[in-house]
Image: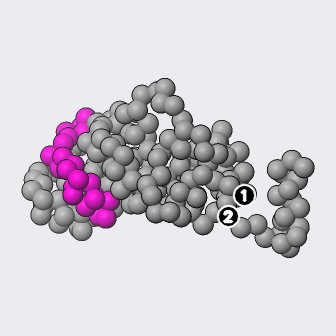
């Protein structure tokens, strides 16, 4: 029986209820699934389907670190693209989605926390833009450059000031952040 048929049969047996993987919230790969519709089949088959067959889920139960390149079927993705670009996308997505655990995981696997996107924004600036004190603190603890400027000449502190994020402003000042908000940009 095809997987879709098995899922429907299970759904009927459970009165329409189908459990989802309990690891979804902490799965670094799940964010990539959410951002890329082409990966929906993985999400359906593992995260929302037979998650006990998911290699990532099984490793998570042991407490070991899960490689970002490990697919749910147990295969390892062979790096063929620009690793820095993948890491940049992943860390900015994690910050925007307020996923501090994912940010920690990305830092553990060596993502450059001072990388800049096309606008020259660093992950710390993105945390400031999102007024996320927790993620900003994680980034600072791991060596984020608080003095970096984006293409408009703004630092994370100036972005936090513009957003009116008092907690973030105080955090950046405690760690040596300086600057005066530039107007007009």
Residue 143 part of the magenta segment: yes
Instruction: Say the numbered circle drawn on residue 20.
Output: 2
Magenta residues, start to end: 133-153
Front-most of residues 180 and 157: 157
Label 1: element kind: loop
Quick one: quadrant of the C terminus? top left
Q: Residue furthest front?
A: 62
Relative to residue 49, is residue 97 drawn left or right? left
Image coordinates for residue 18, horizontal then vertical, percent: 76, 66
Mark in front: 2 vs 1: 1
Instruction: Say the numbered circle drawn on residue 50.
Output: 1
Let me know if residue 182 appears in the view: no
Image coordinates for residue 77, horizontal then vertical, percent: 54, 35
Q: Residue furthest bottom?
A: 15
Q: Residue at position x 71%, y 52% from top?
A: 44
Front-most of residues 140 and 162: 140
Image coordinates for residue 148, horizontal then vertical, percent: 18, 42
Instruction: Say the numbered circle drawn on residue 126.
Output: none
Disc 2: CA contacts within 10 A as few (<14), some (14-19) or many (>=20): some
> In the figure, 134 relative to 43: above or below?
below
Q: Residue at position x 45%, y 58% from top?
A: 64
Q: Residue at position x 88%, y 70% from top?
A: 13
Label 2: element kind: loop
Image coordinates for residue 63, horizontal then vertical, percent: 46, 63
């Amino acid at each position: 029986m095809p997987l879709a048929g098995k899922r429907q049969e299970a759904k009927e047996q459970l009165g329409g209820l189908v459990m989802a993987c309990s690891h979804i919230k902490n799965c670094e790969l799940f964010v990539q699934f959410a951002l890329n519709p082409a990966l929906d089949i993985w999400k359906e088959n593992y995260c929302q389907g037979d998650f006990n067959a998911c290699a990532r889920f099984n490793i998570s139960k042991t407490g070991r670190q899960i490689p970002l390149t490990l697919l749910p079927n147990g295969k390892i993705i062979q790096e063929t693209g620009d690793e820095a670009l993948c890491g940049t996308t992943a860390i900015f997505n994690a910050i925007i989605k307020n996923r501090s655990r994912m940010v920690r995981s990305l830092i553990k696997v060596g993502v450059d926390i001072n990388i800049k996107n096309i606008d020259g924004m660093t992950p710390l600036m993105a945390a400031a833009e999102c007024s996320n004190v927790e993620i900003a603190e994680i980034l600072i603890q791991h060596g984020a450059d608080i003095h970096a400027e984006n293409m408009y000449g703004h630092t994370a502190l100036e972005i936090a000031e513009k957003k009116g994020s008092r907690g973030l402003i105080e955090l950046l000042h405690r760690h040596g952040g300086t600057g005066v908000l530039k107007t007009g940009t």
